[in-house]
Image: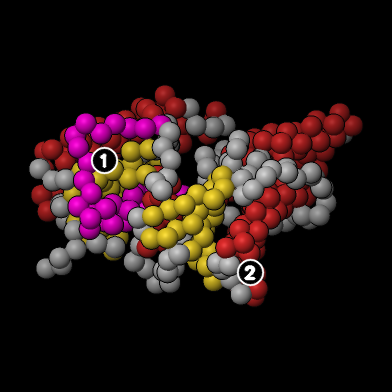
C-alpha cells in the first residue's frame, strides 16, 4: 500500500466545477464539469456560475471518486480553492469541502488558485519537471504574472498586470469582433489562417516587469470602429488577419517583459501556466526560445485551464508540511500569492 496521501481536491473559482483525486503526485482522476449557460451572455455571469456549481458539485465528486477507483472513507485529506476567484463560486466549493472533511474526520487543505496553476508542472507525468528556481509566466483570464518559483512553497512575484489580464484581452477583443464565447480559443484557431503582420497596434509602455492590456484592447476597439464606418463588412472580410495581428500584439507584450526578466535574473528555466498557456502560438514562440538556450516547460493541455488536479498537487506539498486549515477559514475573492 502506498504511503503517499490520498487527497480529493475541489476547484470552483470561476465557471468550471472540477474534482480530482490524487495519490501523492499521481492523478487518479481529474473531472471537469463546464458550464454552457454563459455562452449566450458572452462572459461569465457570477450568479449563474454559483448556481451551476451547486448543481454540479455532487455528481462531479461522485464521478471523480469512481474514476479513481477509491472510496471516500480512504481519503487522507480534502483540498479546495480558497481564492482568488468569484466569491459566490468559491463559497460553494469551500462550504462543500468543509462539510466533507468534517464528515470524514480528515484534515482540510486550502489552496491559492494562482499557486496551483504554477504547481501543475509538478504533477506526475511523462513531461520533465522544472527544477527550482525557475520563472513562471502565468497567463489566464483573470491574471498575468511573472513569478520566480524558488520552491513549491516559495514564490516571488516580479511583475503582474496593472489592469486587464492577457486572457481577458483575448476574450474581450474576440467579443468585440463578434466571436463566440470563450473567445480566446476561437481567436487562436482563426489566427492560424491569418497574417500577423496585416495590422499593427501600439503596445503599452509600463515600467518594470508589470503588464497592461487595457490600452491595447481600447486601441483595437477604436481601430475596428473606424474601419467599420468605412466598410461594414471589414471584420468579416479580415477576420483571420485581425485575429493573427491581435494575437501577435498580446504575445509581443508578454515576451518583451519575460525576456527582460530572464536576462536580468540570468535564469533561463521558463515555465508557463494558466488558461492562455494552451494558446498554440504562445507555445510555438516558447519552443523557438529553446534555440536561444532556454529550458522551456509546458504543461499538459488538461492542466492549463482551471482543473482540480492542480489544486490537488498544491495540496500534496502542503500535506507534507502538515499545513492544514481551520474550520473557520473563509473564501477570498482577492488573494495574493504567498511570499
Q: Determine the image quadrant of residue 68.
A: bottom left
As drawn, is 97 to the left or to the right of 32? left
Position of 277 relative to 329 (above/below)? below
Q: Is residue 322 magenta?
A: yes
Q: Quadrant of the N terminus?
A: bottom left
First-in-chain label (2 vs 1)? 1
Which residue is denoted by mark 1 in the rendering? 59
| Picture colour scheme | secondary structure
Q: Which residues are magenta?
A: 305-333
Question: Residue 228: x and y, percent?
Answer: 83, 32
- Left or right: 150 in relation to 9: right
Examine the rendering and report whether any part of residue 213 can be seen: yes
Q: Please name whichever residue, 108 or 211, is drawn nearer the observer in this view of the structure.
A: 211
Residue shown at the point (46%, 31%) measured from the top left: 37
Residue at (24%, 62%) from the top-left corner? 24
Report how far apart the C-alphas of labels 2 and 1 lie in the structure. 43 Å
> Residue at point 82% right, 48% down?
199
Question: What x and y, as percent, mark residue 264?
Answer: 62, 61
- The residue beneath circle 2 is 289
**Disc on res. 298:** none
In this picture, residue 329 sits left or right of residue 157: left
Residue 309 is inside the magenta segment: yes
Helix, strand or loop status at disc 1? helix
> 109 and 184: which one is in front?
109
**Image location of residue 66, percent across then percent down:** 21, 52
Crowding around mark 1 (Cα neighbors within 10 Å: few <14, some 14 to 19, many 20+) is few
Disc 2 residue crowd, few under 14, some 14–19, many 20+, Cα 10 Å:
some
**Residue at disc 2, secondary structure:** helix
Amino acid at each position: 500500500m502506498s504511503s503517499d496521501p490520498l487527497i480529493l481536491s475541489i476547484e470552483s473559482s470561476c465557471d468550471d466545477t472540477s474534482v480530482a483525486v490524487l495519490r501523492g503526485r499521481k492523478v487518479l482522476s481529474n473531472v471537469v464539469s463546464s458550464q454552457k449557460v454563459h455562452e449566450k451572455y458572452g462572459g461569465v455571469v457570477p450568479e449563474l456560475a454559483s448556481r451551476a456549481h451547486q448543481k454540479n458539485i455532487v455528481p462531479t465528486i461522485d464521478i471523480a471518486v469512481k474514476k479513481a477507483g477509491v472510496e471516500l472513507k480512504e481519503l487522507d485529506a480534502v483540498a479546495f480553492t480558497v481564492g482568488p476567484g468569484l466569491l459566490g463560486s468559491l463559497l460553494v466549493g469551500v462550504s462543500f469541502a468543509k462539510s466533507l472533511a468534517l464528515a470524514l474526520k480528515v484534515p482540510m487543505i486550502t489552496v491559492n488558485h494562482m499557486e496551483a496553476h504554477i504547481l501543475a508542472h509538478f504533477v506526475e507525468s511523462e513531461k520533465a519537471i522544472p527544477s527550482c528556481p525557475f520563472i513562471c509566466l502565468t497567463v489566464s483570464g483573470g491574471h498575468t504574472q511573472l513569478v520566480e518559483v524558488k520552491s513549491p512553497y516559495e514564490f516571488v512575484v516580479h511583475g503582474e498586470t496593472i489592469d486587464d489580464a492577457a486572457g481577458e484581452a483575448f476574450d474581450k477583443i474576440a467579443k468585440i469582433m463578434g466571436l463566440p464565447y470563450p473567445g480566446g480559443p476561437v481567436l487562436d484557431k482563426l489566427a492560424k489562417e491569418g497574417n500577423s503582420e496585416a495590422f499593427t497596434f501600439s503596445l503599452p509602455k509600463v515600467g518594470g516587469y508589470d503588464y497592461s492590456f487595457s490600452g491595447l484592447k481600447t486601441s483595437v476597439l477604436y481601430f475596428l470602429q473606424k474601419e467599420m464606418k468605412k466598410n461594414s463588412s471589414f471584420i468579416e472580410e479580415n477576420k483571420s488577419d485581425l485575429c493573427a495581428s491581435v494575437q501577435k500584439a498580446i504575445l509581443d507584450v508578454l515576451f518583451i517583459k519575460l525576456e527582460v526578466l530572464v536576462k536580468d535574473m540570468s535564469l533561463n528555466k521558463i515555465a508557463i501556466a494558466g488558461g492562455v498557456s494552451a494558446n498554440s502560438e504562445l507555445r510555438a514562440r516558447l519552443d523557438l526560445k529553446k534555440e536561444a538556450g532556454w529550458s522551456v516547460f509546458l504543461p499538459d493541455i488538461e492542466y492549463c485551464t482551471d482543473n482540480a488536479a492542480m489544486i490537488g498537487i498544491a495540496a500534496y506539498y502542503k500535506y507534507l508540511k502538515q499545513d492544514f486549515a481551520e474550520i473557520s477559514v473563509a473564501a477570498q475573492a482577492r488573494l495574493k500569492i504567498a511570499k
